[in-house]
Amino acid sequence: MNNIILIGMPGAGKSTIGVVLAKILGYQFLDSDLLIQKQEKRKLHQIISQEGNDGFKEIENRVNASIEAEETVIATGGSVVYCHEAMEHLKSIGTVVYLKLSLKPLSKRLGNLQGRGVLLKEGQTLKDLYQERTPLYEKYADIVVDEEGKDLETCIQAVLNRLSAEKR
């Protein structure tokens, strides 16, 4: 139960913040997208194009639901919130932190969504995706950290402050 699970939109900084957070806390760091790629021996965008969105979600659910870790910061893929079983498992092994960022800075940070392995339905825009996922992030989050207008260091400090307040 001593893990920290980061959720949020692609480009919210889950991996970047996760690595630094792990160093500060003396934890391990695990990127579940990289774990999926390692287990599947394919890049995310290849899995999505070969298996389709539903096939990818099945793989993402299976991999995330099987993570066993202690004292680990886990950066999840942005679409993990579609995987109920995985999210229930992740909530059972740690504190889920939603890194919240509005659409405008997200769109500035993100380049080619397909090349990043972002799960998009046919014709779906980043705005559509944001509106679809935000309620799911809020549903599963134990803690919400608003990153709006904050630099990396300030975001990390905000996560640490919220985590220590949660433990009290």
Image (cartoon, grey):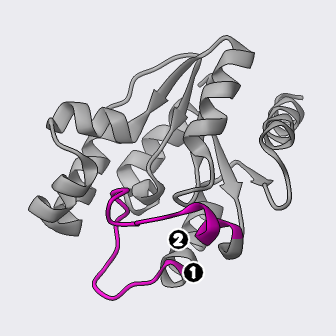
- Residue 33 in the image: state x and y as whole percent: 37, 42
Q: Label 2 to label 1, Cα distance in Å?
A: 6 Å
Q: Nearer the viewer, residue 122 or 131?
A: 122
Residue closest to the far left: 50
Q: Residue at x 61, y 33 (%)?
A: 18
Position above or below: 95 against 105: above
Position above or below: 88 against 16: below
Q: Nearer the viewer, residue 58 or 102?
A: 102
Residue closest to the far top: 26
Task: Tell me whether circle 2 and circle 1 mark residues in contact (CB < 8 Å).
Answer: yes
Tag 2 secondary structure: helix
- Residue 41 in the image: state x and y as whole percent: 15, 35
Q: Residue at x 66, y 52 (%)?
A: 98
* Quadrant location of the N terminus in the rendered image: top right
> Residue 131 — which label?
1
Verify whether residue 148 appears in magenta: no
Name the dominant secondary structure of the magenta segment: loop
Residue type of the residue flagged with mark 2: Arg
* Quadrant location of the C terminus in the rendered image: top right
Q: Which residues are magenta?
A: 105-126
Position above or below: 109 against 60: below
> Residue 103 — which label?
none
Residue closest to the far bottom: 123
**Count of residue discs:** 2
- Residue 71 in the image: state x and y as whole percent: 59, 16
- Residue 149 in the image: state x and y as whole percent: 85, 59
Tag 1 secondary structure: helix
Q: Nearer the viewer, residue 143 or 159?
A: 159
Q: Which residue is mark 2?
A: 133
Residue type of the residue flagged with mark 1: Gln
